[in-house]
């Protein structure tokens, strides 16, 4: 275990490692994936140096494998995230996240006059731009951009 | 279009517009019929809009239909805290179609998803008011004998004006040349200009239109409201620039017509009303025929 990278967060036997999360969005990712309701063993590391992101965070979840639909939701706050699928201490698969075409129930609409901000209605957006995320509200048709994006929960 | 809700002008294709306009033309020739006999239509006005409501109710009554509903939220169960979901689901049991106006944006879309009968959006906040746009198209086609290749002037509050945004979207199907005339603070938002760029359509921006009005086929006036300005001085400086006067119409094209979604405040001087180029009151009348066409089409009667 001379490799300094491995000292950051301990290894897991089976499960998923989510790497390259922008440090400031770690808690958003935890909330989007609803990890607090999961009983698995988890380790988080944050404010680790990354050439790409400045400071990054990493999540390791034992015995958990995410469906694509589930994991793609985090692309909104961690577009560079990389997944390592671990089996018996070995990486058996690597995945990147992809921004979905539709975002349901994660983001709050930026428009205070939107029906979803005034009645108990699940938000729904069409993703109109993926590189610099822009979400068009299915109800009020207003655009919520990256800068104004607020995660529900 | 049968049984399909009309929430946004983007719900309809170019062909759908034409179909509605042709139908509206038939209703204009024969506005009193009994094709809605036995039908009950709910007009749910969660905020008052007498003009729009009367236009719908006139359209329904002239076709022999019955109207139920409320004219503002204070006189309904809504004031007792009922959710939109519950109001719509309940009312849908009592009628064949719902016409609704609501101050919150996206409310009509949501209503159409929980309603068992089709919904027509009669205005959801600053978002959409598609029947207004269709009656605008009808008025333009009727006065210009075509919708193609026209020079359309949009004047006034182009930033917040929902009617001009929807009209722009609809007219973009017809190779329109757009002239945007507004105070700098109330310019047409970029997203619409990008949209026109992508379609390769021409548009020009101006802060005054006295010198260029002679090029217009249609001048669509809207109100410039003092509250929209961050600097009240700016309003005072520019307010008279966006008021149409009879003297400005001297060198305009013979086919030119002035439209306005109404109500007007002072952006069109009353001395214009007698000018043959003033069309805004007839435009309001066209709303009845257009709404008859929309109702008949959604109910599958035409
Ligand atoms: Zn919205």
Image: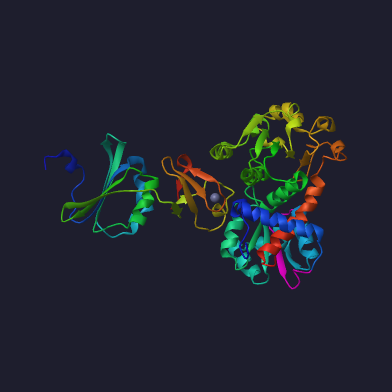
Residue at 58% over, 57% down: B109
Q: Quadrant of the N terminus of chain A?
A: top left
Number of on-image labels: 0
Judged from this view, the residue extending furthest toward the left is A2
Kindly indicate the quadrant of the structure image that contains residue B112: bottom right
Does the magenta-highlighted stretch encompass residue A102? no
Q: Position of residue A7 (x, y in %)?
A: 17, 42
**Left or right: residue B252 compared with residue A42:** right
| Residue B53 seen in the current view | no
The percent coordinates of residue B55 (x first, y second) are: 77, 56
Q: Residue furthest bottom?
A: B38
Q: Does residue B156 appear left or right of residue A44 in this picture?
A: right
From the viewer's side, name the closer residue of B250 and B263: B250
Q: Work out whether residue B179 can be spotted.
A: yes
Image spot of residue B259 (x, y percent)? 76, 42
The residue segment tinted magenta is B34-49
> Which one is nearer the viewer's eye here, B199 or B93?
B199
Q: Is residue B78 above or below residue B203?
A: below
Find residue B253 and report its image quarter: top right
Magenta stretch: dominant secondary structure: loop
Quadrant of the image occupied by residue A133: top left
Membership of B46 in magenta stretch: yes
Q: Where in the figure is residue A80, as x and y percent of width and height?
A: 33, 42
Q: How is the image coloured?
A: rainbow
Q: Does residue A117 appear to the left or right of B68 in the view shown? A: left
**Which one is in front, B15 or B282?**
B15
């Amino acid at each position: 275990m001379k490799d300094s990278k491995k000292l950051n967060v301990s290894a897991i036997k089976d499960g998923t490692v989510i790497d390259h999360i922008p440090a400031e969005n770690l808690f958003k990712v935890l909330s989007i994936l609803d990890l607090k309701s999961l009983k698995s063993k988890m380790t988080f590391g944050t404010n680790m140096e990354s050439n790409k992101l400045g400071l990054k965070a990493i999540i390791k979840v034992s015995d958990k494998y995410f469906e694509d639909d589930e994991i793609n939701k985090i692309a909104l706050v961690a577009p560079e995230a990389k997944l390592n699928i671990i089996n018996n201490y070995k990486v058996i698969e690597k995945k990147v996240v992809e921004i979905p075409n539709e975002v349901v129930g994660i983001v709050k609409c930026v428009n205070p006059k939107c029906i979803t901000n005034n009645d108990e209605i699940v938000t729904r957006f069409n993703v109109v731009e993926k590189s610099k995320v822009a979400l068009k509200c299915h109800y009020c048709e207003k655009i919520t951009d990256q800068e104004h994006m607020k995660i529900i929960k | 279009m049968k049984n399909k809700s009309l929430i946004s002008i983007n719900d309809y294709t170019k062909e759908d517009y034409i179909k509605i306009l042709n139908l509206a033309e038939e209703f204009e020739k024969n506005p009193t019929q009994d094709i809605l006999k036995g039908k009950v239509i709910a007009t749910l006005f969660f905020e008052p809009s007498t003009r729009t409501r009367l236009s719908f109710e006139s359209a329904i009554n002239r076709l022999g239909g019955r109207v139920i509903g409320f004219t503002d939220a204070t006189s309904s169960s809504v004031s007792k805290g009922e959710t939109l979901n519950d109001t719509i689901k309940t009312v849908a049991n009592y009628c064949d179609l719902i016409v609704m106006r609501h101050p919150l944006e996206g409310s009509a879309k949501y209503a159409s998803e929980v309603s068992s009968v089709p919904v027509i959006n009669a205005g959801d906040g600053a978002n959409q008011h598609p029947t207004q746009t269709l009656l605008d198209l009808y008025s333009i086609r009727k006065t210009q004998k075509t919708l193609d290749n026209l020079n359309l002037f949009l004047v006034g509050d182009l930033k917040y004006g929902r009617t001009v945004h929807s009209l722009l979207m609809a007219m973009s199907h017809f190779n329109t040349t757009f002239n945007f005339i507004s105070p700098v603070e109330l310019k047409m938002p970029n997203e619409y200009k990008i949209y026109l760029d992508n379609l390769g359509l021409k548009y020009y921006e101006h802060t005054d239109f006295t010198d260029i009005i002679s090029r217009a086929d249609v001048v669509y006036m809207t109100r410039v409201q003092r509250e929209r300005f961050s600097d009240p001085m700016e309003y005072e400086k520019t307010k008279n620039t966006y008021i149409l006067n009879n003297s400005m119409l001297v060198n305009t094209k013979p086919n030119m017509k002035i439209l306005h979604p109404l109500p007007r405040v002072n952006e069109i001087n009353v001395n214009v009303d007698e000018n043959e180029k003033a069309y805004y009151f007839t435009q309001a009348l066209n709303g009845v025929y257009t709404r008859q066409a929309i109702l008949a089409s959604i109910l599958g009667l035409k």
